[in-house]
Amino acid sequence: MGRKSPIYAFVSRGGAILVEFTEFTGNFTTIAMQCLQKLPSTNNKFTYNCDGHTV
């Protein structure tokens, strides 16, 4: 099975996205901000799988 590339990646500190990368169009920043708001402050990594992709 081939290796899948990430469709969106970002680095944040607190509630601010410092840098992000994607080669696709979509509402990735909006979804990322929603995920950040739901994370406990003790978490330092978040991954999400959807349709065989890890976000």
Image (cartoon, rainbow, N blue to C red):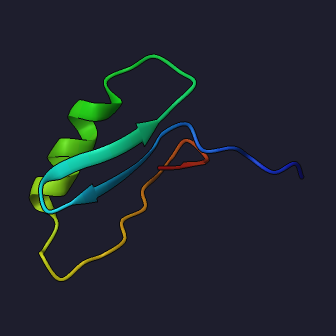
36 up-or-down from 32: above or below: below
Foreground: 7 or 15? Answer: 15
The residue drawn where x is 16% and y is 66% is: 39
Indicate left or right for 20 with 43 as reference. right
Most extreme residue toward the front, as rendered? Answer: 18
In this view, the residue farthest toward the bottom is 42
Q: Residue furthest right?
A: 1
The image shows a total of numbered marks equal to 0
Residue 9 in the figure: left or right of residue 38: right
Q: Height in image: 27 above or below 51?
A: above
Q: Nearer the viewer, residue 16 or 37?
A: 16
**Residue farthest top in this picture:** 25
Q: Position of residue 7 (x, y in %)?
A: 55, 37
Tell me if 43 is positioned left or right of 54 in this view: left
Q: Is residue 27 above or below residue 14?
A: above
The relative height of residue 22 versus residue 38 in the rendered view (above or below) is above
Find residue 35 and report its horizontal and vertical position in percent.
21, 52
* Percent coordinates x, y for residue 4 in the rendering: 73, 46
The percent coordinates of residue 36 (x first, y second) are 18, 55
Q: Nearer the viewer, residue 49 or 39?
A: 39
Residue 42, picture quadrant = bottom left
Please name the residue shown 12% across and 76% down the image: 41
Which residue is located at x 60 percent, y 44 percent?
6
- Which residue appears at 25% of the width and 78% of the height? 43
Left or right: 3, with 43 as reference point = right
Q: Quadrant of residue 19?
A: top left
